[in-house]
Image (tube, helix red, strand yellow):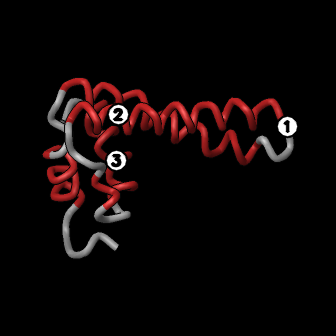
Amino acid sequence: MLGNRSWDSWITRYSESHQHPLNQLTHTFGIPMILVSLPMMIAGIFWRPVLWVGIGLFVVGWALQFLGHAIEGKPPEFLSDWRFLLVGTRWWAAKMRGKV
C-alpha cells in the first residue's frame, strides 16, 4: 500500500507541500476535526444530535484544509494520490510530537 516507500518518505513529501505557516495551522486543526467527525457520524446513526455535530466538524475540517491550500497556492496532495489522505494523519501526529 505504501508503494515501497517508508512513512518518513511519505511525510517528507507531504511536508514539502505544506510549508506556509497558515496552511500548517489550518491542517493542525482541520485534520483532527475530520478524524473526530468520522466516529461521530457513525454514532449519529443511533443518536441524531451527534450526527449533526459530526457533519459540522467534517465540513469545517475540510474547509480548513482547502483554505490552507489556497493560502499555500498548491493543490492538496491527495488529488494526485489518494494515499496522502492517510499520510495527513501521520503528518499531524508527527507534528504534535515535534517531529515535523
Query: Could you tell me which residue is drawn at 34 percent across and 73 percent down?
Result: 1
Q: Check disc 2 and give the amino acid type.
A: His
Q: Quadrant of residue 96?
A: top left
- The answer to whether residue 62 is above or below residue 10 is above
SS assignment at label 2: helix
**Could you tell me how far apart the alpha carbons at marks 1 and 3 are, in whole angstroms?**
29 Å
Residue that numbered label 1 is attached to: 47
- Discs 1, 3 touching: Cβ within 8 Å: no
Query: Could you tell me which residue is drawn at 86 percent across and 44 percent down?
Result: 46
Residue that numbered label 3 is attached to: 88
Query: Could you tell me which residue is drawn at 37 percent across and 63 percent down?
Result: 82
Given residues 30 and 69, the one toward you in this image is 69
Q: Looking at the rendered structure, which numbered label has been put on residue 27?
A: 2
**Could you tell me how far apart the alpha carbons at marks 1 and 2 are, in whole angstroms?**
28 Å
Q: Check disc 1 and give the amino acid type.
A: Trp
**Could you tell me how far apart the alpha carbons at marks 2 and 3 are, in whole angstroms?**
8 Å
